[in-house]
Image (spheres, rainbow, N blue to C red):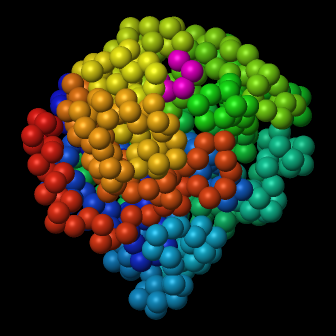
Amino acid sequence: MIIKRGNGILLHLTSLPSEYGIGDMGPGAYEFIDFLEETKQSYWQMLPLNPTNPAMDNSPYSSVSMYAGNPLVISPALLLENDLLTKSDLKAAPEFPAERVSYDDVIKFKNSLFYKAFERFNKNKKLFISDFEHFIDKNEHWIEDFAFFRALKSSFKEQSWGYWQQEVRDRKESVLEPLKKKLRDRIELEKFIQFMFYDQWRALKKYCNDKGVQIIGDVPYYVSYDSVEVWKNPEIFKLDKKKMPEFVAGVPPDYFSDTGQLWGNPVFRWDVLKETEYDWWIQRMKHNLSLFDIVRIDHFRGFVAFWEVPASEKTAIHGEWVKAPVMDYFNTVLKHFPHLPIIAEDLGFITPDVVETIHHFGFPGMRVLSFAFDENLPRNPDAPHNHIQNCIVYTGTHDNNTVKGWFKQEANDKMKKSLFTYAGRTLKIDEVPTEFVRMAMKSVANTCIIPMQDLLGLGHETRMNRPATSSGNWSWRLLPNKINRSLKKRLTELTEIYGRV
């Protein structure tokens, strides 16, 4: 339970301004933290920080690893400060667009930088070796397998591990050992990249915490099939004899799609997880609680029951709900983490047992104002008058349209009328985002999180993700001139007047 009444901003690292095509952990991130401190914000919420994949539209929710960091947010400017790059290396940067991430160009450029930084690291190893070896020792439970997996992926031309030769797919030790020797240089490169990521992340998080701002991270419930976690632990997923998924994850038809959402992730074998006292999940939680101050669990309802679809299906319509041992699981987790700082993402199709679980453990759930103004407004839990203290109120999430985009593209006449009646006046389209921000901050909810796009009153073209679509997402970027004196003054005043300092 989050006791402190506070306010925060939702903005992913990749959306920050930078010179190198994508937001990173460099000067832009530190300037954003200064902005949060100056405007008396308590939280910075971001999306998952794991590596992304162009084949999966660079979604932060689809990754080859649940432990590794995303190399694309490593700051070239900080590598220059650490003498791992030269000024001439950075002068080779192409002309990147400021308003969108051009992932193909960013990947090509940053990979070239990582090779150069690795060469300088090897030439001056005595300057870094102590910190590097300490990092490897501290992360030995995942770093070796991850680096080897990435090296194998590269050697197999990024083919999914389920299609590798059988001995490698099935992790036959007599075959893997020679491959490790053969791929040694690439394995060391992958370790070095992770060393750079975590070195920059630890410094950034410390700066953030020293400024009185807590970081809310995001942990997906599922992991990707084409990941080191599934390759290494096939027994905890519902796979067939050829290590291919028998069932995949998704959700039934909902607000976002008439045919549901077929995510394609392998589903868990909770009976096997239970036999090990959920060690796999415990280690995952431990890692994320070391990275973030608070963790938002995406698709929390999966711990209660998950939508399981036969892998042969083309849509998510023909699935079924399968129960998970939620009470036993969280009772076990709480033995390891008695004060578990998590937020339950309880959006979508939520059944009474999910609500009961959240209430039983006292986890704060989510309320989204974009969902409030329907025909059920008086009783709608997302409406401000129905909020409770122990929840997180959002104007919208990374999956929603912006408030301005919602009003223009999705709200019908009845919804607009309900909004105007609720606000006590007719609103112009440019006034709607400001009204939503005020309603969120006025809420009795202890925690209020505003997506940066809504704070700026931006339109649908700036939304982060369109669920059930597979292209053009995750690329919006904040232009550097958008954070100005007027915005700082307005945000500070609202934060103060509604008691969120």
Residue 229 position, x and y percent, is 65, 39
Residue 326 vs 346, above or below: the answer is above
Residue 327 or residue 454, whichever sits in front: 454
* Residues rendered magenta in the picture: 345-350
Residue 6 position, x and y percent, is 20, 36
Which quadrant of the view contains residue 363? top left
Residue 110 position, x and y percent, is 55, 73
Residue 17 or residue 260, whichever sits in front: 260
Horizontally, is 441 left or right of 24 in the view? left
* Magenta span includes 346: yes
* Magenta span includes 216: no
Q: Name the residue at 36% across, 39% down.
A: 395
Q: Name the residue at 29% across, 26% down.
A: 384
Quadrant of the image containing the N terminus: top left
How many numbered marks does the figure carry?
A: 0
Q: Name the residue at 53% across, 67% down.
A: 101
Q: Name the residue at 58% across, 10% down.
A: 325
Residue 462 position, x and y percent, is 47, 58
